[in-house]
Image (cartoon, rainbow, N blue to C red):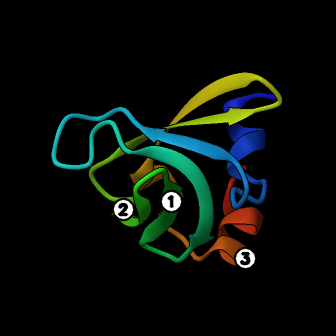
């Protein structure tokens, strides 16, 4: 699994951590929803909505961690799956 393959996958259900500096840094948990501009992440403290733009996400898939910039996946989920090449 490489970055491009992960970007074409369904991200809901994956573990995500925000690794970019800023107010969302350190938020981690399971992705429970995705829109064009945000992810909803279920953390131990509750659900948090995190903007894609301006954040770097570290996704875990099958034990492998892959970093993706939110700006690279600023699409509706159904469009992102078709667009990323």
Closer to the eye: label 2 or 3: 2
Contact (Cβ within 8 Å) of mark 1 with mark 2: yes
Residue position for label 2:
50
Specify the farthest residue to the top: 64
Residue 53 percent coordinates (x, y): 32, 58
Residue lying at 66% horizontally and 66% vertically, measured from the top left: 80
Distance (Cα) linking label 1 and label 2? 7 Å
Q: Earlier in the sequence, mark 2 or mark 3?
A: 2
Residue position for label 3:
78
Residue 5 percent coordinates (x, y): 78, 41
Q: Is residue 81 above or below residue 85?
A: below
Please give the label number shown on residue 12: none
Residue lying at 17% horizontally and 48% vertically, measured from the top left: 23
Q: Secondary structure at mark 3?
A: helix
Q: Earlier in the sequence, mark 3 or mark 1?
A: 1
Viewed as shown, does residue 32 lie left or right of 71?
A: right
Query: Which part of the image, by quadrant, shows the N terminus?
Result: top right
Q: Secondary structure at mark 1?
A: strand
Distance (Cα) linking label 2 and label 3? 19 Å
Q: Is residue 25 above or below residue 42?
A: above
* Circle 2 crowding by C-alpha within 10 Å: few under 14, some 14–19, many from 20: some
Residue lying at 42% horizontally and 72% vertically, measured from the top left: 37
Figure quadrant of residue 56:
top left
Q: Is residue 20 above or below residue 81?
A: above
Residue 16 percent coordinates (x, y): 55, 43
Residue position for label 1:
41
Viewed as shown, does residue 41 lie left or right of 60?
A: left
Nearer-the-camera pick, 61 or 69 = 61
* Circle 1 crowding by C-alpha within 10 Å: few under 14, some 14–19, many from 20: many
Nearer-the-camera pick, 4 or 14 = 14
Q: Earlier in the sequence, mark 1 or mark 2?
A: 1
């Amino acid at each position: 699994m490489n970055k491009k393959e992960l970007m074409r996958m369904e991200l809901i259900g994956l573990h995500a951590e925000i690794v970019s500096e800023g107010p969302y840094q350190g938020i981690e948990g399971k992705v429970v929803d995705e829109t064009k501009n945000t992810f909803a992440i279920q953390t131990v403290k509750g659900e948090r909505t995190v903007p894609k733009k301006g954040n770097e996400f570290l996704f875990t898939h099958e034990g492998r961690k892959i970093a993706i910039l939110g700006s690279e996946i600023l699409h509706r989920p159904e469009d992102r799956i078709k667009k990323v090449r």
